[in-house]
Structures are given as structure tokens and as C-alpha cells.
Amino acid sequence: MRKIILIIAFISFSAYSQTNQFTGTWSNENCTNCNKKYILNLNIAQSNSKIFGTAEVTGKDEKLNSGIMEVTGYVYVLGEKAQITIKTKDGASTSAVLFVNDGVIQLSKRGGSDLIPKEAILTKLSE
């Protein structure tokens, strides 16, 4: 009986860890309560505990436009939090933490260059 319970627990943990919650195209353009000075787009793919993808900031002001940036990072054990690094072609980089909750990602910038906004709420545009 003890072995069966351990096997079921192991299967449930491994099934939970296989969920790729961060995969998709995320943006703040559909945000109703946000200031629309800029639009942040994240196109990321999650493979188990690794994250890869691209990011772009666009806005009405030319100073806010960033071009395509590279995103790399990793997902924490339970899969609800991720640490990412965003790099430009020029070599400037910044780090941020992503929290996923009910199909929404909260981005909090931790340090580095001013490539992205300090905080943003991103919704999923596509898978």
C-alpha cells in the first residue's frame, strides 16, 4: 500500500512539473487599467525548467522602442515563478521575475538597464 501511494504521489508531482505555463505570446496591449505609453511583447517557450524567447518594447515615443531582445531564464521548482534575463544586440541586459497566476503574468524588473518597464501585467495572446 505504501508503494502505491508513493507512486501516485510521484506521478502527480511529475505531471505538475511538466506543465509549461509560461509558453506563449504575452503582452500588455489588452490591459484596461494600464498606462499605454508602451507595449511589452514576450514570445517565450518553456521546456521543463528552461525559458527561451524574444521580447520587444514598442511605443509612440521612439525612445521607448527597443527592437528585438533575447530572453533566457529558468523556472523555479513549482512552476509558478521564473527568473529571466533580457539582452539586447548591443549587450545591455536586465533581469526580471515572472509570476504566473490564472493566465496572467506579473513581470517585476529586478535590476540592470532600463530596457523594460519596472512592472507590467501581461495577458496571453496566443499559445
Image (spheres, helix red, strand yellow):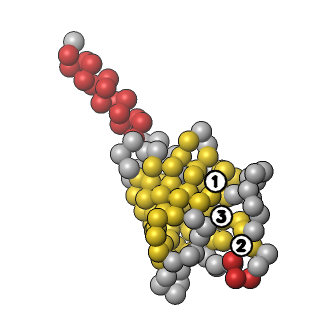
Q: What element carries label 3?
A: strand
- Residue 33 is left or right of residue 74, and the answer is right
Label pair 2/3, CB-CB below 8 angstroms: yes
Q: Which amino acid does label 3 sit on?
A: Asn
Q: Is 62 above or below relative to 2?
A: below
Q: Is residue 94 shown to the viewer in this render?
A: yes
Q: Is 50 above or below relative to 89?
A: above
- Residue 71 vs residue 83, the one in the foreground: 83
Earlier in the chain: of badge 1 and badge 2, it is 2
The residue at which mark 2 appears reads as: 58
Q: Is mark 1 on a helix, strand or loop?
A: strand
- Residue at 25% across, 23% down: 6
Residue 80 spot, x, y in % from top left: 46, 44
- Residue 77 vs residue 47, the one in the foreground: 77
Q: Residue 121, which numbered label?
A: 1
The residue at which mark 3 appears reads as: 41
Question: How many numbered circles does the render carry?
Answer: 3
Q: Residue 68, which numbered label?
A: none
- Residue 82 is left or right of residue 14, and the answer is right
